[in-house]
Amino acid sequence: MYKRREFNQRRIRTFDPSRIVSQNGRTGQPEEKYVPVHKFSDFALHQQLKQNVTTKGFSEPTPIQDQVIPALLAGKDVTGIAATGTGKTAAFLLPLINKVFANKREKVLTITPTRELAVQIDSEFRTFARSMNLYSCVCIGGASIGRQIGELRRNPNFVIGTPGRLLDLERRHALRFGDYGSVVLDEVDRMLDMGFIPDVKHIISLLPSVRQAMFFSATLPDKIRDIIASFVKDPVVVTVHPGEAAVNVDQEVIRVGGRQKTDLLQEMLSGNGFEKVLVFGRTKHGIDKLAKFLYQKGRQVEVIHGNKSQNQRQRALEKFRNNGVQVLLATDVASRGLDIDNVTHVINYDLPETYEAYIHRIGRTGRADKKGTALTFI
């Protein structure tokens, strides 16, 4: 299932999804429809929070929300293993907002692997906490650390950030991990991929011994099991479709043959239904080169990758989210945590490195019970 190929004298690890697509069919394995045990109205949430949930358009909880919210409201630690797009952000935000609203001295720390995911969680927090006088601070690289220090001085209820920036703020005495009685580690397998595990372990060592802890990951590699053991105590374990492709995503492998991938992509983007397309490439240089080609062909495109500033990345995402462009070109910086409505297609222009990366890429479409299509160039 894995293969290696030569590129500039280096061996590049790649994952070829041909086998799982042929095994599972284009739509993945069929699943029984989950019947929630609860309604949102059943949860012991403050009335304003319930109103904000209704305004958000939530009618009934997803499987992970149905199981995680009662456990967190009861003060339990939780380990959640769930595929992307299953609603886990709301699963931990709702009970934590309720907890902090009842006790304003309580503070919540959420640690994420990427800047985009931190911003996404903050956006959902602001929606759910509307009119509740609760405040947040996003602490990520690529943004002004001075401004973040100023915001932390205002004692926000929720701090959401990436490991490196959080540790930098702690070293500057702007942040004290011992103050946070509720802590969320989100997308921990991605933190492993990005080399953040030593930072995460250091942060855990500085947390208060008495805390409510939440651990979320789409997959569960052996290398992060010791983190779970050190982080959560007697947790409620909720597992929802670990490591499986979203059942709402039609998957297809496109055999390129001797054709140029640039020409093939251009033809596809001219086809019916390719209204909002997320294209994944392997390298920043390759993505920039592809963007230039598509722009010359008259395509409306935006680009996000690690060389872009945080402001540039956010502007590109907002433009794509608001249908200002047809195509967003990205490296795997965008494969986790981005909740963008109505992405019609994900195209793997370059093969992902691993099965997990493939699952997270294609999880950008087919979200919230909508159908999507994932195409992979081979």
Image (cartoon, rainbow, N blue to C red):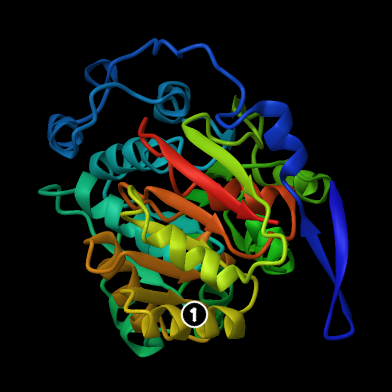
341 over 122 or under it: above or below? above
Viewport quadrant of the C terminus: bottom right
Res 160 seen here: no
The residue that appears at 66% across and 46% down in the rendered structure is: 231
Where does the image place residue 125, in percent across and percent down from the top left? Answer: 29, 51
Rendered image quadrant of residue 156 = bottom left
Seen from this angle, which residue lies furthest front? 258
305 over 14 or under it: above or below? below
Which residue occupies the foreground of this view, 50 or 354? 354
Which residue occupies the foreground of this view, 286 or 237? 286
Which residue occupies the foreground of this view, 299 or 277? 299
Which residue occupies the foreground of this view, 102 or 346? 346
Where does the image place residue 133, in percent across and percent down from the top left? Answer: 15, 53
The residue that appears at 43% across and 45% down in the rendered structure is: 365
Rendered image quadrant of residue 275 = bottom left
203 over 370 or under it: above or below? below
User: Relative to residue 40, is residue 3 drawn left or right?
Assistant: right
The residue that appears at 76% across and 54% down in the rendered structure is: 15
User: Relative to residue 205, is residue 249 drawn left or right?
Assistant: left
Under mark 1, the amino acid is Leu
301 over 145 or under it: above or below? above
Where does the image place residue 353, in percent across and percent down from the top left? Answer: 74, 60
Please count the marks in the image.
1
Residue where numbered disc 1 is placed: 169
Rendered image quadrant of residue 151 = bottom left
